[in-house]
Amino acid sequence: MAAPFRITRKTVRPVAREPGADVKDYLERLIKLIPAEVISLYLVGKGIIESERYPLLGWTLFCLIAVGLVRLYGTADPEKNQPPQLPAVLIACISYLVWVYSMGGVFATFGVYFPKIGSLLVLGWTFVVPYVYQGDPETQ
């Protein structure tokens, strides 16, 4: 007679993580929602402008428009006659603003940046987005 199979439990040991690693993971997830080329564009421009208030505000808005345009173009499929995915465009634009806020950026130059709020925005936004937007059902 064959012995019945046994289910054994594997002991999982917690992995030691450095302080702030969870926030870093969420920030990395947030960045994936924003077109990488715009992140690079923003960072290079911000490095050139440094902390000049109004030029940095203009640059931040320019990059926000670039996020919208890149996502509009990237989510449309003219060959299949599919329009842009407007929810994805909106999510990318909000993600960009959350990311800029979490980094300080233009918000710090105007004195409305609070690091803890930035961290909470990143955590909340990256938690909520997958539940709110599942992607375009036609492309899945």
Image: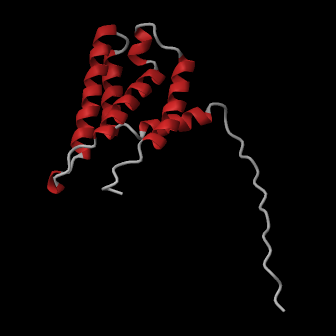
Q: Residue at x 67, y 35 (%)?
A: 18
Most foreground residue, 125 or 32: 125
Vertical position of residue 24 compared to residue 78: above or below:
above
Say left or right for 64 vs 25.
left
Percent x, y for residue 72? 23, 39
Percent x, y for residue 58? 27, 16
Q: Residue at x 50, y 29 (%)?
A: 122
Q: Residue furthest bottom?
A: 1
Image quadrant containing the C terminus:
bottom left
Vertical position of residue 7 compared to residue 35: above or below:
below
Most foreground residue, 83 or 37: 83
> In terms of image quadrants, where is residue 46?
top left
Colouring style = secondary structure
Percent x, y for residue 104? 45, 18
Q: How many marks?
A: 0
Vertical position of residue 140 compared to residue 61: above or below:
below
Percent x, y for residue 119? 54, 25
> In terms of image quadrants, where is residue 70?
top left
Image quadrant containing the N terminus:
bottom right
Q: Residue at x 34, y 54 (%)?
A: 137
Q: Residue at x 80, y 74 (%)?
A: 6
> In terms of image quadrants, where is residue 51?
top left
